[in-house]
Image (cartoon, rainbow, N blue to C red):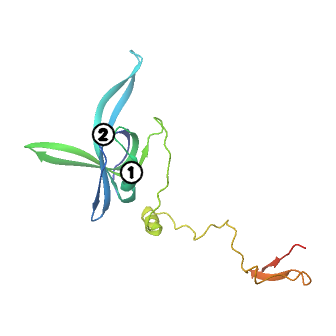
C-alpha cells in the first residue's frame, strides 16, 4: 500500500467527541502543531505557523483516547495522512485528516500513569489488535493439589506414594514425621 504515514507532536485543540457508528466507535478531535525554532540573535525559542489536523481514532483506540485526552494536553499522534478538498461558499478548502493508529501523551512535557484497559471480550479485542491470545492460566502459578488431603493421606508406615506421572517424570508425595 502506498499510504502516507505521519507522526505529529502537538496539542489537543478541541474537546474529544466520541460516537458509536455502524463500523465501531470513533473519537475525533482537532490537533494543533506549532513549529518552534531557536532564534540565535534573540537567544530564545520562537513559534512558527500552527497547522491544524482533524484526528480520528477508531474502536478501542478511540475509546481510550476519549477516556484519556483533554484540551491542551501535549500528544504524539501517529497515523495515516488523508488530504481532502471541499467547496464551501464557492471557495475550495483543503482539509488534512489523520486516521490515528497510535496516540500517546508527549512525555517530554509531563508524566503519565498508564492503566491497562480490560475488555468485555478479551479474545475479540486481542484479535483486533493482532495480539496473540494469552495462555489460559499463569504458567508460574502453583497448581492446585491433584488429590484431596482429607481423603488421600499417606500412611507413614508405608512411606511416599507415587501420585502422578507426567511425561516420564514421577512425583512422589512425601510426608513429614
Q: Mark 1 points at which residue?
A: 67
* Labelled pair 2, 1 in contact (Cβ < 8 Å): no
Expressed as whole percent of the image width and height from the top left, the position of residue 136 reads 57, 71
Expressed as whole percent of the image width and height from the top left, the position of residue 119 reads 45, 63
Q: Mark 2 points at which residue?
A: 13
- Binning the other alpha carbons within 10 Å of mark 2 as few (below 14), some (14 to 19) or many (20 upward) gives some
Q: In this view, does 149 lie above or below 91?
A: below
- Binning the other alpha carbons within 10 Å of mark 1 as few (below 14), some (14 to 19) or many (20 upward) gives few
Residue 76 lies left or right of residue 137; in this view the side is: left
Q: Is residue 161 above or below residue 85?
A: below
Residue placed at 37% from the left, 29% from the top?
A: 36
Expressed as whole percent of the image width and height from the top left, the position of residue 135 reads 58, 69
Observer-nearest residue: 32 or 5?
Answer: 32
C-alpha span from label 2 to label 1 = 16 Å
Q: In this view, does 124 lie above or below 153?
A: above
Mark positioned earlier in the residue sequence (2 or 1): 2
User: Based on the displayed image, in which of its 4 quarters is residue 62 positioned?
Assistant: bottom left
User: Based on the displayed image, in which of its 4 quarters is residue 59 positioned?
Assistant: bottom left
Residue placed at 46% from the left, 63% from the top?
A: 130
Amino acid at each position: 500500500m502506498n499510504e502516507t504515514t505521519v507522526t505529529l507532536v502537538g496539542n489537543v485543540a478541541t474537546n474529544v467527541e466520541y460516537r458509536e457508528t455502524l463500523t465501531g466507535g470513533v473519537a475525533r478531535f482537532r490537533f494543533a502543531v506549532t513549529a518552534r525554532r531557536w532564534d540565535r540573535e534573540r537567544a530564545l525559542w520562537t513559534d512558527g505557523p500552527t497547522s491544524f489536523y482533524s484526528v480520528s481514532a477508531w474502536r478501542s483506540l478511540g475509546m481510550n483516547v476519549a477516556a484519556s485526552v483533554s484540551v491542551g494536553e501535549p500528544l504524539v499522534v501517529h497515523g495515516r495522512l488523508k488530504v481532502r478538498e471541499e467547496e464551501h461558499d464557492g471557495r475550495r478548502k483543503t482539509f488534512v485528516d489523520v486516521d490515528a493508529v497510535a496516540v500517546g501523551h508527549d512525555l517530554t512535557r509531563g508524566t503519565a500513569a498508564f492503566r491497562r484497559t480490560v475488555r468485555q471480550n478479551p479474545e475479540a479485542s486481542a484479535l483486533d489488535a493482532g495480539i496473540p491470545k494469552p495462555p489460559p492460566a499463569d504458567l508460574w502459578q502453583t497448581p492446585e493439589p491433584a488429590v484431596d488431603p482429607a481423603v488421600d493421606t499417606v500412611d507413614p508406615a508405608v512411606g511416599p506414594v507415587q501420585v502422578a506421572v507426567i511425561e516420564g517424570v514421577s512425583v512422589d508425595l512425601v510426608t513429614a514425621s
